[in-house]
């Protein structure tokens, strides 16, 4: 059994913190400053995001933007393209989980896999 104190982790203001991971599950926290966010992409497995603080938008490849705010949960089906962006004035902090190990495919809108394309992985902190 593992535990994480989200208040303490949010205070670090690190962009991405990997919390828990197994061979078929992962949980992480994202912290986007105003204007920051993800690229348009999808994953091979379903995932959810819980908005812990802040506000922003989630946009699909062929859909309109939808505002998100604190205490809302976003569900994304497998291979559902999306982009998250902080449109607020405070950090947008999200708790995410997905049914795959860390390092799974991150497929961009052009069809390339960012995890195979990038020589250097994004800096992260693991508990």
Image (spheres, rainbow, N blue to C red):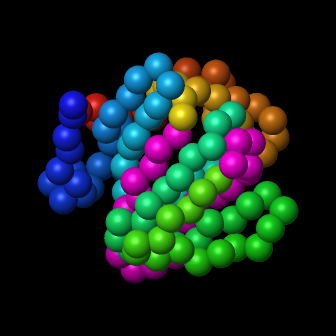
Q: Is residue 113 left or right of residue 111?
A: left
Tell me the quarter of the image containing the C terminus.
top left
- The residue lying at 59 percent from left, 77 percent from top is 67
Q: Is residue 79 left or right of residue 83?
A: right
- The residue lying at 47 percent from left, 19 percent from top is 23
Q: Is residue 79 magenta?
A: yes
- The residue lying at 70 percent from left, 29 percent from top is 113
Which segment is the magenta one? 77-98
Determine which quarter of the picture holds residue 122.
top left
Q: Is residue 84 magenta?
A: yes
> Residue 69, percent across and down?
46, 76
> Residue 79, percent across and down?
74, 42
> Residue 47, percent across and down?
57, 46
- The residue lying at 50 percent from left, 65 percent from top is 73
From this view, report whether residue 95 is shown above or below residue 16.
below
Determine which quarter of the picture holds residue 59.
bottom right
């Amino acid at each position: 059994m593992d535990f994480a104190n989200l208040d303490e982790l949010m205070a670090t203001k690190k962009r991405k913190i990997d919390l828990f991971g197994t061979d078929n599950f992962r949980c992480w926290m994202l912290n986007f400053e105003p204007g920051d966010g993800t690229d348009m992409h999808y994953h091979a497995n379903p995932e959810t995001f819980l908005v812990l603080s802040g506000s922003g938008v989630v946009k699909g490849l062929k859909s309109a933007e939808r505002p998100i705010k604190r205490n809302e949960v976003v569900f994304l089906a497998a291979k559902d393209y999306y982009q998250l962006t902080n449109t607020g004035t405070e950090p947008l902090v999200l708790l995410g989980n997905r049914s795959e190990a860390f390092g799974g495919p991150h497929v961009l809108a052009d069809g390339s896999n960012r995890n195979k394309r990038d020589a250097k992985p994004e800096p992260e902190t693991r508990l």
